[in-house]
Amino acid sequence: ICAVLLELLILRISEQTLSYDEADSKAWQTYQQCRQFMEANYLTIHSVKETAVRCHVDPAYLCRLFQRFSREPPHQLLIRLKMGRAANLLAHSDLLIKQVAQVIGLNDPYHFSNLFKKIHGVSPKAFVKKSHRYHRLQP
């Protein structure tokens, strides 16, 4: 979790280091609008194409915006946001792994587990065990 938070912090800092011309450009504004839309609606978004349609841009252009202004493609941002929410739900609720997968929009628990392990480095089951063990140790 710390590694993901550190990566997020680095991404945020790198976004703020744009030149004045870039920050004032229409492309930057479109990127910011699309990113904010994704961050606000990631639980209901199922694909980058859906994001592009709802933001009124071409999917290829959306990918180019992310390539220009971000260190992660839009698909990776979407997965990272969903997996962050999943980790929060697994750590702080009594939902089953398959229920958490459904909440974040993934109906296949096997696919969810693979993505979760890829992002967080541990399986959802191991994550739940570690988080419950941690919460029992806290006063």
Image (cartoon, rainbow, N blue to C red):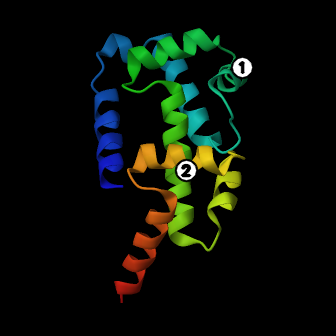
At label 2, counting other C-alpha atoms closer than 10 Å, the crowd grade (few under 14, some 14-19, many 20 or more) is: some
Image side of residue 92 versus residue 57, left or right: left
- Using the rendered image of the protein, determine whether residue 138 is visible from the camera's viewpoint: no
Q: How many marks?
A: 2
At mark 2, the secondary structure is helix
Q: Residues within 10 Å of mark 1 (few under 14, many from 20)?
A: few
Mark nearer the N terminus (2 vs 1) = 1
Name the residue rendered at 53%, 38% in the picture.
79
The residue under label 2 is: 113
On-image quarter of the C terminus: bottom left
Q: Relative to the observer, which residue lies in front, 110 or 77?
A: 110
Q: Residue at x 33, y 34 (%)?
A: 11
Residue 89 point in image, percent of width and height: 57, 63
Q: Quadrant of residue 126?
A: bottom left
Q: Amino acid at mark 1?
A: Val
Q: What's the residue type where badge 2 is placed?
A: Ser
Residue bearing mark 1: 53
- Pick the front one: 28 or 53: 53
Q: Position of residue 35 (x, y in %)?
A: 53, 30
What residue is at 43 percent from the left and 44 percent from the top?
Answer: 119
